[in-house]
Image (cartoon, rainbow, N blue to C red):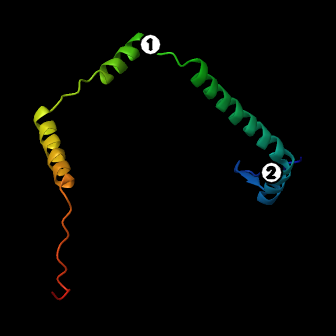
């Protein structure tokens, strides 16, 4: 790889863009597979580390356990009046269903 850098009297750097692009292209062609596998290995390693942490380090501190218990320790309030209304409604429907079926007269049939 040969870079052609030219300096002029005003100390500005003139770079041949085509040459730099060509060198970068050749370097990429040589390295893209290696970079892919290095990146793949890094992602697999990070995923394995996170997985291990979740499986083997799943213990809670005493404070976290107590916080969870406090959020789950809620009493159920029994609303007896509402329950009685629903129970009475079910009973009345049951009584209505147990009555003997009486067919309705056919309004289209001539008598």
Q: Is residue 11 above or below residue 84?
A: below
Between marks 1 and 2 in the image, the one whose residue lies nearer the viewer: 1
Label 1 to label 2, Cα distance in Å?
53 Å
At a point 18% along the width and 29% down the height, the residue shown is 78
The earlier-in-sequence mark between 1 and 2 is: 2
Q: Is residue 104 above or below residue 64?
A: below
At a point 19% along the width and 46% down the height, the residue shown is 90
Q: Which residue is mark 1?
A: 61
Count numbered badges in the picture.
2
Check residue 43 in the rendering and tell me which mark sits there, or answer none: none
Check residue 24 in the rendering and tell me which mark sits there, or answer none: 2
At a point 23% along the width and 27% down the height, the residue shown is 76
Image coords of residue 18 (percent x, y): 80, 60
Q: Secondary structure at mark 1?
A: loop
Farthest left residue? 81
Image coords of residue 39 (percent x, y): 73, 39
Q: Nearer the viewer, residue 41 or 72?
A: 72
Asked if marks 1 and 2 touch (Cβ < 8 Å), the reply is no
At a point 10% along the width and 36% down the height, the residue shown is 81
Q: Is residue 54 above or below residue 27?
A: above
């Amino acid at each position: 790889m040969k870079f052609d850098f030219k300096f002029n009297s005003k100390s500005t750097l003139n770079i041949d863009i085509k040459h730099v692009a060509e060198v970068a292209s050749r370097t990429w062609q040589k390295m893209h597979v290696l970079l892919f596998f290095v990146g793949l290995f890094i992602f697999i390693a990070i995923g394995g580390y996170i997985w291990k942490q979740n499986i083997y380090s799943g213990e809670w501190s005493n404070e976290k356990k107590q916080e969870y218990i406090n959020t789950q320790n809620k009493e159920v309030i029994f609303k007896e009046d509402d329950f009685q209304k629903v129970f009475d409604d079910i009973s009345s429907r049951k009584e209505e269903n147990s009555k003997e079926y009486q067919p309705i007269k056919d309004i289209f049939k001539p008598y």
